[in-house]
Image (cartoon, rainbow, N blue to C red):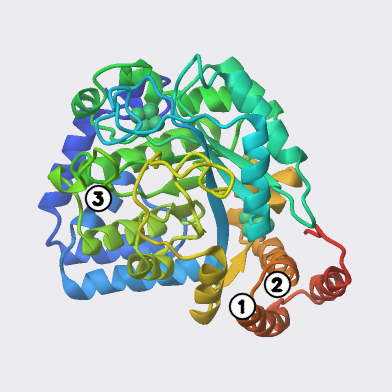
C-alpha cells in the first residue's frame, strides 16, 4: 500500500503505485491539453507530483517537448542563474564486500588493484586537489567493515579539514558511503559533513536484488531507508540518485521523485541534490551489455523534467558524461559538476603513488579543472567554488525556505564571484584568468542589492590583496 510518509521502503516506494503511474502516464501521453496544463503548473515553480512528471516524460510531441525544455532552462536560470558549483570526488578505498554487478569494486573482482589511502596518502591527495583549486569534495569508499570502518571515514574527514596548503582549503566534505546506522549518521553529522549522498541504484526491488546478490547492500529495505536514518541522525542535507541503465528509466524516474516526495512529506525537507549518473564501462564491466542503457536524448529529457518537477533541488553530473553531453544538460538543469576528476584510489597524487588500475568507472571528460573552468566561462557560466551554506548553518529546512523564496540568490551570486576571484588569484592559467576577470567585472554589475554589491566589491579587493574565505 502506498504511504508517502511511511518509514517502510516498500510503502513509500510502492511498486504498485509506480506501475499505476506508468500506465497512467502512457495513457495520457497524447493528451496535449493535460500536458499543457502540467507545464503551466510547473511554471509556478512549486514542483510537480511523480504522476504529473511521468506524463511529461512520456510526451513525445516535438512542440511540447520543446516547451518542457524551454521551461527547464527558465527555471534553471531563475533558481541557479548562470552559476555552476564545482566539486571533485576523492576515493578513499576500493575495498568492498558487496557484489554490485555494475561496479568493478565488487568483492569477486580479482583483477582490480585494491587500495586504501593512509592518512598520509590523504594529505597528498588533498594537497593535489587544493593545488588544482578545489574547495568541495565528495568522499567515496566501498563498504568494508574491516578496511573502511566508520572510524576510518571520520578520521579521514578530520584529516581533510585540517590541511591548509598555501591558500588552499577543503571547506565542504560531502560523503558517499554505504547505508549505515542512525548512530553512525550522527557521528558523520558531528564530523561536519556537508551532504550525505547515497544512490539507490534502482528502485525496482526485484532487479535490485538481482544486481546485488550478496553483501549488506543486498538488503533493499535497509538501503532504501538509509536517508530516513540519516535524517534521524541529524543530517538534513541528503543527496539521492539512481544509476540510469540498471533498470527501465521510466520506473526509476518515478521512484526517484517518490523518494523526494517522501523525504519532504516526512521530514519537511526534500533532497538537497539529485544525481543523474548513467551506467558506464570500467575494468570488468561492459556498459554495452546493459539493455536498459539510455540515449543522450532520453537523458536530456530526464534532466529537464526533474528540473521542473523539483526546482529547488540541486542536480549533479560527474565526469562519466562527455563534454558534449555535459554542455546540453547544464542548460537544462544541472547545477553542480565535477572537474579534473580521478576515479581511482590515490589518483590525484600520481607522482607519489604507482599508477595501477583502481578506477570505479571510465572518465569521459578528461579535461583539467582549469580547462573546465575556462570552458564554462566561455559558455557564459560562472564556475563557483562556494561552500557557504552549511558553514553558515543554512542547511535542511532553513536552506530550503531560502531557496523556495528565491532569497538564496542574494548569497549565491556574490559568493560565486568571490570564490572565482580566489581561484583566479591562486590557480588559474593566464587565459582562464582573463576570462574570469571579464566575467567578474560584468556580473558584479548585475548584483541587484547595492549594499551586497558594495561589500562584495570590497571583498574582491581584499582577496586580490591576499585575504581569503569571505562569504555571505
Ligand atoms: Fe561496493 Fe559501492 Fe561498488 Fe557496490 S557500488 S561494489 S557497494 S563500491
Ligand atoms: Fe550553494 Fe549556498 Fe553557496 Fe549558493 S550560497 S552556491 S546554495 S553553498
According to the picture, the residue beneath numbered tag 3 turns out to be: 54
Dots 2 and 3: beta carbons under 8 Å?
no
Q: CA distance from mark 2 to mark 3?
A: 43 Å
Q: How many marks?
A: 3
Determine whether label 2 and label 1 are within 8 Å by CB: yes
Residue plotted at (42% across, 41% down): 356
Whole-percent x, y for residue 292 in the image: 16, 45
Circle 1 sits on which residue? 432
> Percent position (x, y) of residue 407?
67, 61
Q: Is residue 162 above or below residue 451?
A: above
Asked if one can make out residue 457 in the rendered structure from this viewpoint, the answer is yes
Does dot 1 land on a helix, a strand or a loop? helix
The residue at which mark 2 appears reads as 424
Residue 135 visible in the shown view: no
Figure quadrant, ligand 1: top left
Image quarter in which the C terminus is found: bottom right
Decide if residue 158 is on the left or right side of residue 335: right
Give the mark toward the camera: 1 or 3. 1
Amino acid at each position: 500500500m502506498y504511504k508517502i510518509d511511511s518509514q517502510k521502503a516498500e510503502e513509500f516506494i510502492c511498486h504498485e503505485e509506480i506501475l499505476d503511474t506508468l500506465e497512467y502516464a502512457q495513457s495520457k501521453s497524447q493528451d496535449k491539453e493535460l500536458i499543457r496544463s502540467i507545464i503551466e503548473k510547473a511554471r509556478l515553480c512549486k514542483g510537480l507530483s511523480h504522476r504529473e512528471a511521468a506524463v511529461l516524460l512520456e510526451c513525445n510531441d516535438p512542440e511540447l517537448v520543446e516547451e518542457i525544455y524551454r521551461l527547464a532552462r527558465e527555471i534553471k536560470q531563475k533558481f541557479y542563474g548562470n552559476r555552476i558549483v564545482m566539486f571533485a570526488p576523492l576515493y578513499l578505498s576500493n575495498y568492498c564486500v558487496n557484489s554490485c554487478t555494475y561496479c568493478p569494486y565488487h568483492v569477486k573482482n580479482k583483477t582490480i588493484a585494491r587500495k586504501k589511502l593512509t592518512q598520509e596518502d590523504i594529505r597528498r591527495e588533498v594537497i593535489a586537489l587544493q593545488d588544482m583549486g578545489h574547495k568541495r569534495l565528495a568522499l567515496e569508499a566501498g563498504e568494508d567493515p574491516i578496511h573502511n570502518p566508520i572510524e576510518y571515514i571520520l578520521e579521514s574527514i578530520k584529516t581533510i579539514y585540517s590541511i591548509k596548503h598555501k591558500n588552499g582549503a577543503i571547506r565542504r566534505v560531502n560523503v558517499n558511503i554505504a547505508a549505515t546506522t542512525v548512530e553512525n549518521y550522527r557521528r558523520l553529522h558531528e564530523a561536519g559533513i556537508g551532504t550525505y549522498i547515497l544512490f539507490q541504484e534502482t528502485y525496482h526491488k526485484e532487479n535490485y536484488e538481482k544486481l546485488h546478490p550478496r553483501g549488506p547492500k543486498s538488503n533493499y529495505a535497509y538501503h532504501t531507508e538509509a536517508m530516513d536514518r540519516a535524517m534521524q541522525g541529524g543530517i538534513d542535507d541528503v543527496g539521492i540518485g539512481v544509476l540510469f541503465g540498471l533498470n527501465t528509466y521510466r520506473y526509476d524516474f518515478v521512484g526517484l521523485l517518490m523518494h523526494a516526495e517522501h523525504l519532504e512529506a516526512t521530514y519537511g525537507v526534500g533532497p538537497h541534490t539529485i544525481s543523474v549518473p548513467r551506467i558506464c564501462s570500467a575494468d570488468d564491466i561492459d556498459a554495452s551489455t546493459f539493455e536498459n542503457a539510455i540515449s543522450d536524448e532520453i537523458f536530456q529529457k530526464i534532466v529537464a523534467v526533474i528540473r521542473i518537477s523539483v526546482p529547488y533541488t540541486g542536480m549533479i553530473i560527474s565526469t562519466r558524461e562527455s563534454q558534449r553531453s555535459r554542455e546540453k544538460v547544464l542548460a537544462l538543469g544541472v547545477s553542480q559538476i565535477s572537474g579534473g576528476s580521478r576515479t581511482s584510489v590515490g589518483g590525484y597524487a600520481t607522482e607519489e603513488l604507482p599508477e595501477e588500475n583502481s578506477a570505479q568507472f571510465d572518465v569521459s571528460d578528461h579535461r583539467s579543472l582549469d580547462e573546465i573552468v575556462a570552458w564554462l566561462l566561455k559558455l557564459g557560466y560562472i564556475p563557483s567554488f562556494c561552500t557557504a551554506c552549511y558553514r553558515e548553518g543554512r542547511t535542511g529546512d532553513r536552506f530550503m525556505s531560502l531557496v523556495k523564496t528565491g532569497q538564496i540568490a542574494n548569497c549565491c551570486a556574490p559568493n560565486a564571484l568571490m570564490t572565482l576571484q580566489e581561484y583566479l588569484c591562486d590557480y588559474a592559467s593566464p587565459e582562464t584568468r582573463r576570462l574570469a576577470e571579464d566575467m567578474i567585472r560584468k556580473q558584479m554589475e548585475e548584483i541587484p542589492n547595492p549594499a551586497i554589491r558594495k561589500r562584495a566589491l570590497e571583498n574582491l579587493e581584499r582577496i586580490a590583496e591576499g585575504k581569503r574565505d569571505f562569504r555571505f
